[in-house]
Structure formats: C-alpha cells, structure tokens
Amino acid sequence: MSVVHVTIDGVDVTLYGKMDIGDLVAVAATLEA
C-alpha cells in the first residue's frame, strides 16, 4: 500500500492504495478541469 500526498492549486489531496503514475495523472487532470 502506498500513500501519495500532493497539493494542487492549494488543495491537499491524499491518495491511498495501489496507484501508478497513470492514476496520478488522471486525478490531476480531473482536479484541474
């Protein structure tokens, strides 16, 4: 299990579980939309 914490445009996002870079890109794209 991995925990990835990122801040996008001042919004803290913590992602849990088995996520690869593709998932991170998809999440980032969704948040930026």
Image: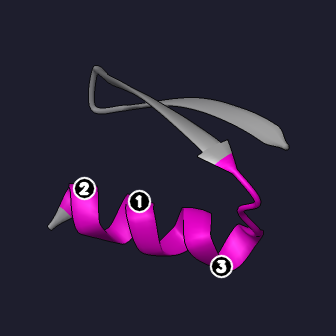
- The residue type indicated by label 2 comes to Leu
What secondary structure is marked by label 1?
Answer: helix
Residue at which label 3 appears:
22
- Mark toward the start of the polypeptide (3 vs 1): 3
Label for residue 31? 2
Identify the residue shown where x is 76% and y is 69%: 20
Q: CA distance from mark 3 to mark 1?
A: 10 Å
Q: Quick one: 28 or 18, which is closer to the camera? A: 18
Q: Quick one: 17 or 6, which is closer to the camera? A: 17
Q: Quadrant of the C terminus?
A: bottom left
Left or right: where does residue 18 sit relative to residue 11? right
Q: How far across and how far down the image is residue 6, in percent?
A: 54, 31
- Residue 14: say if magenta: no
- Residue 18: say if magenta: yes
What secondary structure is marked by label 3?
Answer: helix
Label for residue 28? 1
- Which stretch appears magenta? 17-32
Residue contact between numbered discs 2 and 3, judged by CB atoms under 8 Å: no
Classify residue 19 by image quadrant: bottom right
Identify the residue shown where x is 34% and y is 70%: 29
Classify residue 24 by image quadrant: bottom right
- Mark toward the start of the polypeptide (2 vs 3): 3
